[in-house]
Image (spheres, rainbow, N blue to C red):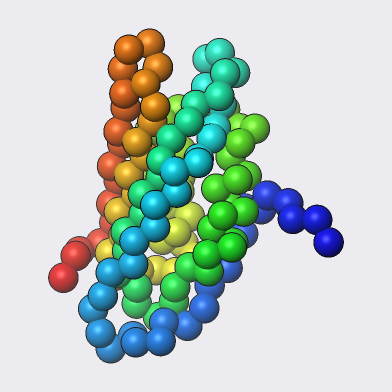
Amino acid sequence: MTTKPSKELKTFDNPKPDRNYEIYFDCPEFTCLCPMTDQPDFASIEISYMPDKLCVELKSLKLYLWSYRDEGAFHEAVTNKILDDIVAAIEPRWVEVCGVFNVRGGIETSVVASHGTKA
């Protein structure tokens, strides 16, 4: 069976829903396309969240991030879209997505978007 990119974020039950704890993902191989030039934009996507009832399954996150490889997206838009999709999938107590995009034209861009309240 061939692995393919997917927009589906799979979940599993939080093993400790009564406890506040933070999960951190560092995804240093994120790629999308610049919507102005169609050239690749490389970034590290950092995701921190405090789960409520559900957690994000890692392989589905990998395939989800891979799905952006051939899509044109401004840094601000893609970072906020990732945040929105995580919120829709797991309804966390708190989540923050940081996109750290490689230098382009002498400028490094970081976009930080969050949802909820960190306890």
Q: The N terminus appears in which quarter of the rendering?
A: bottom right
Q: Residue furthest front?
A: 28
- Is 99 situated above or below 5? above
Say left or right for 97 vs 54: left
Residue 15 on image: x %, y %: 40, 87
Residue at (45, 59) in percent of width and height = 86
**Residue 42 visible to an observer of this rendering:** yes
Residue at (33, 67) in percent of width and height = 23
Quarter of image, res 43: top left
Quarter of image, res 17: bottom left
**Which of these two is toward me, 1 or 51?**
1
Residue 70 on image: x %, y %: 65, 32
Residue 45 on image: x %, y %: 41, 45
User: Disc count in the image?
Assistant: 0
Q: Residue furthest left?
A: 119
Residue at (39, 68) in percent of width and height = 91
**Which of these two is toward me, 49 or 29?**
29
Q: Residue furthest right?
A: 1
Q: The C terminus appears in which quarter of the rendering?
A: bottom left
**Which of these two is toward me, 68 or 62?**
62
Residue at (25, 84) in percent of width and height = 19
- Is 9 situated above or below 96? below
Quarter of image, res 112: top left
- Is 112 situated above or below 115? above
**Residue 9 visible to an observer of this rendering:** no
Residue 78 on image: x %, y %: 46, 38
